[in-house]
Amino acid sequence: MLKTVKSKVIASTIFLSIVGLISMTYYLSSTIHEISNKSTKESLLMLSESIFQSLTNLTVWLLAILLWWKSRCAQLALLMV
């Protein structure tokens, strides 16, 4: 099948090119997968921290409104006496 040196060199070059292409594809695929997973985890962490901060701020505002309302009701009760 491969009788001449030229055909052996061409076949070897094609074979090594295909092996290299498959290796690079696998490496790039696994690297992109790792980067994607890392990015997703960081995004979810930031989202959960943001939600926690929003809920904390909402709780503080509701507590402040509740305290204001309590003092306002106390003032109205004193006026009624």
Image (spheres, rainbow, N blue to C red):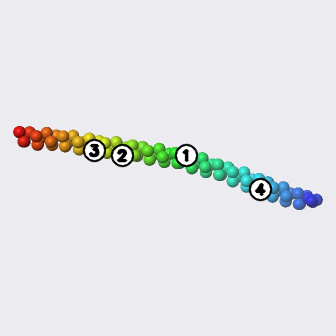
Number of marks: 4
Q: Secondary structure at mark 2?
A: helix
Query: Quadrant where the C terminus lies?
Result: top left
The residue that disc 2 covers is: 54
For mark 4, what is the residue?
A: 18
Of pointers 4 and 2, the one earlier in the residue sequence = 4
- Badges 4 and 1: C-beta atoms under 8 Å apart? no
The residue that label 1 is drawn on is: 38
Disc 2 to disc 3, C-alpha distance: 11 Å
Q: Residue 47: percent from the left, percent from the top?
A: 44, 47
- The residue under label 1 is which amino acid type? Lys
Q: Residues within 10 Å of mark 1 (few under 14, many from 20)?
A: few
Q: Nearer the viewer, mark 3 or mark 4?
A: 3
- Label 3 sits on a secondary structure element that is helix
Q: Residue 61: give its label.
A: 3
Q: What residue is drawn where x is 39% and y is 43%? A: 52
Find out whether the residues at labels 4 and 2 contact each other: C-beta distance under 8 Å. no
Q: Amino acid at mark 4?
A: Ile
Residue type, label 2: Ser
Q: Marks 2 and 1, how far apart in space?
A: 24 Å
| Residue at screen point 88% across, 60% down | 7
Q: CA distance from mark 1 to mark 3?
A: 35 Å
- Residue 58 lies in quadrant: top left
